[in-house]
Amino acid sequence: MTDVAARLEELRERGLYRRLRLIEGPQGPRVTLSGREVLLLCSNDYLGLAADRRVREAAAEAALRWGAGAGASRLISGTMQPHRELEAALAAFKGYDRALLFGSGYLANTGTIAALAGPGEVVFSDELNHASIIDGCRLSRAETLVYRHNDVDHLESLLRSAPGTPALIVTDGIFSMDGDVAPLPELLELAHRYGARLMVDEAHATGALGPGGRGSVSAAGLSGEVDIVMGTMGKSLGSYGAYVCANEETVDFLVNRARPFVFSTAPAPPIVGAALAALSILEAEPERVDRLMANALVLREGLAAEGFRMGDSTTQIVPIEIGEAEPTMALCERALERGVFAQGIRPPTVPEGSSRLRFTVMATHDPEDLRRAAREVGAAAREIGLLKAPTLAG
């Protein structure tokens, strides 16, 4: 047995082996999986725009006009009119001087953090931040101090321990595995008090929170005040890629020093065109955000009625924590048999002992389907002994 085969076998034994599932058709509230229609509750296409006709047509038109690819990095010959248009639209939407496109959210976070922090400096990171933030901290070679989840008192104690050191505080806006929201006003106040920059990852908040879906920073009334706001086009905007919003000086610095920007081919015109169309739809149809939040409440109430606990989730991300990996995946598969596709999440995506079924709601879900999904997952959990069967009174 090779070393790779042995490692794979270890993953299987620990219940951590992963495999790809094939969706047969476009994203939507219902999809075909292995020849069978199921209710999709693990997509980040929160506003249902990935398959929207207007977004598809915009992608096709951009391909026909500008080509299938950009051909080079932005600093060589890859900057095209669609990039400039989308950056201007995103900056205006978020309330910032400028926006800068990256190839993915992972590249945006790693590149931005590594550019803004370095050896001899300190980054303060929430313990439940996304992996791309964690890796950005590692790549920066700055000292990284991890504060307890959303614990501003613990963060302040760490800030006091590094007086006078250039610092970056970085947090998710909506935490991707828990569905709760960062205490941004308190974080910004600490950043100002201790001379640190604040960076907020709004990958899951754009299109879901704030006036017109402008995100967690806007929801907190802090547009233009938080130093750096990162977001993606691959979730609510139905396309692919990412952006960073900041002031002119910071964006100019990232153009020169963010290695994933400097050394990557520019985002392809079709995905830029699609994202620009999706952003226009979001601005014209803010009721999609209202439907998303209403649907999330329907699912949370349905799961609570079945006896599940969902932690501190107040958003479209609704986790039910199981604990160990094997029963989590058993519930995932049993729910899928009942027509509900919600993916089990295991380490290293979440800490050991906190494996969970993670539901993500879409604005295009039918509320009654969500109520039915909660009942089916409850029945599946009782079948495998994760929930007790209800007792009849009288």
Image (tube, rainbow, N blue to C red):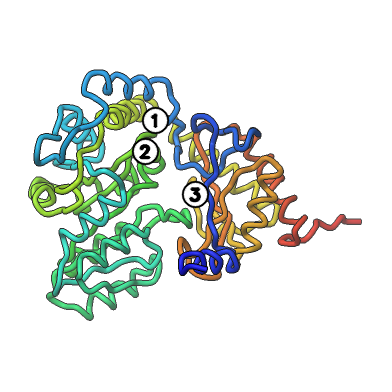
Residue 353 placed where, x, y %? Answer: 55, 70
Judge by depth and name the residue closer to the eye, 258 or 309.
Answer: 258
Q: Position of residue 378 (x, y in %)?
A: 71, 51
Residue pointed to by mark 1: 286
Amino acid on which the number 1 mark rests in the picture: Pro
Amino acid on which disc 3 is placed:
Ile
Task: Find residue 21 and report its image quarter.
Answer: top right
Q: Is residue 365 left or right of residue 388?
A: left
- Crowd rating for badge 2 (residues with CA inside 10 Å; few <14, some 14–19, many 20+): many
Which callout, 3 or 2, points at the residue further toward the start of the chain?
A: 2
Q: Residues within 10 Å of mark 3 (few under 14, many from 20)?
A: many
Q: Secondary structure at mark 1?
A: loop
Q: Nearer the viewer, mark 1 or mark 3?
A: 3
Query: From the viewer's perspective, is residue 41 above or below residue 357?
Result: above
Residue contact between numbered discs 2 and 1, judged by CB atoms under 8 Å = yes
Choose between 236 and 312: the one closer to the eye: 236
- Give me the residue at 55% from left, 60% from top: 17
Can you identify the residue that label 2 sits on? 213
Q: What is the distance, in whole Å, between disc 2 and disc 1 at their CAs?
A: 7 Å
Amino acid tagged 2: Gly
| Residue pictured at 25% horizontal, 57% vertical | 110
Residues at marks 1 and 3 touching, judged by CB atoms closer than 8 Å: no
